[in-house]
Amino acid sequence: MRTQILLKRAYHDTVTIPMLFLIGAGLTQQPSRIVAPTLKIDANDAHEFPKEAINIDPNNLKIKALSGYIKERFKISENKAATIVSEAFRNGLKQGLQPELILAVIAVESKFKEKAVSPAGARGLMQVLAKAHPKKVKRLGGLPALYDPRKNISLGSHILAQYKDVSNGNIRRTLLRYNGSLSKGSRYPDKVMRIYKQMKTTARLTEQLQLAQASRITVH
């Protein structure tokens, strides 16, 4: 019985909640049948992105869906959400990381508060710890630069990508390294992956809805 309750709760978190955000954002007219996506992460899935930089279209449906999700869940402005999501996509492409993973790290680290400072001195959206990366922070422009969303995401995603390489693509170990808890063990990766899956579901449902709506238009 307890297992059934937990499964229902997990489904609600990973499918129902993102779906409600899409409906609230006006991105769907609730088509009659949506196939729930399989929720998993491949340790090598980040390599699906090319290394070369490309322009990020802020009107991209996936970006708009994720921006709406973040705006509603974390109570930030639409412009701020759109900027952060666009930067996550830009740096995901550059660093070979899933943008949803970058966004999930931001969610857990700072709850999308660009001025956040931890007791240990980690700063900004991705809570970059200057004393752990002094040369990188200096090149970025020093401590004040860590409060700039674009610069913080750029450096934070670069560090995350480096840890991913050191971890041979193992996402759990990558996240433990980023959190500084590799030798201690931590639930940090579980927290990140829970939000990651919700964001991936939001993006996938958006694509399914777009195809369904396009199909109806074609038929009529």
Image (spheres, helix red, strand yellow):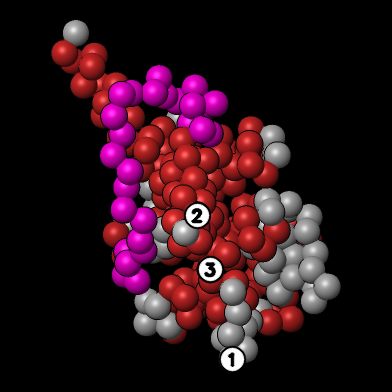
Residue 145, image x and y in percent?
A: 73, 60
Q: Secondary structure at mark 1?
A: loop
Front of the two marks 2 and 1? 2
Check the picture and name the quadrant holding the C terminus.
top left
Vertical arrangement, residue 35 with respect to residue 39, above or below? above
Q: Which residue is mark 3?
A: 190
Q: Secondary structure at mark 3?
A: helix
| Disc ID at residue 183 | 1
Most extreme residue toward the top, as rendered? Answer: 220
Distance between the alpha carbons at the discs numbered 2 and 1: 33 Å
Most extreme residue toward the bottom, as rendered? Answer: 183
Distance between the alpha carbons at the discs numbered 3 and 1: 16 Å
Compared across the picture, whether 31 is left or right of 156 comes to left
**Does the segment drawn in magenta span residue 157?**
no
Compared across the picture, whether 169 is left or right of 216 comes to right
Residue 96, image x and y in percent?
A: 38, 63
Which amino acid type corresponds to the residue marked 3 in the rendered image? Asp
Crowdedness of circle 2 by 10 Å Cα count: few (<14), some, many (20+)? few
User: Residue drawn 73% across and 53% down?
Assistant: 114
Q: Nearer the viewer, residue 70 or 83?
A: 70
Crowdedness of circle 3 by 10 Å Cα count: few (<14), some, many (20+)? few
User: Residue drawn 51% across and 33% down?
Assistant: 20
Mark found first going from the N terminus, 2 or 1: 2
Mark found first going from the N terminus, 3 or 1: 1
Question: Which residues are drawn in magenta?
Answer: 20-46
Res 121 → quadrant: bottom right
User: Residue drawn 37% across and 82% down?
Assistant: 168
Q: Which residue is mark 2?
A: 5
Give the dominant element type of the magenta stretch: helix, strand or loop: loop
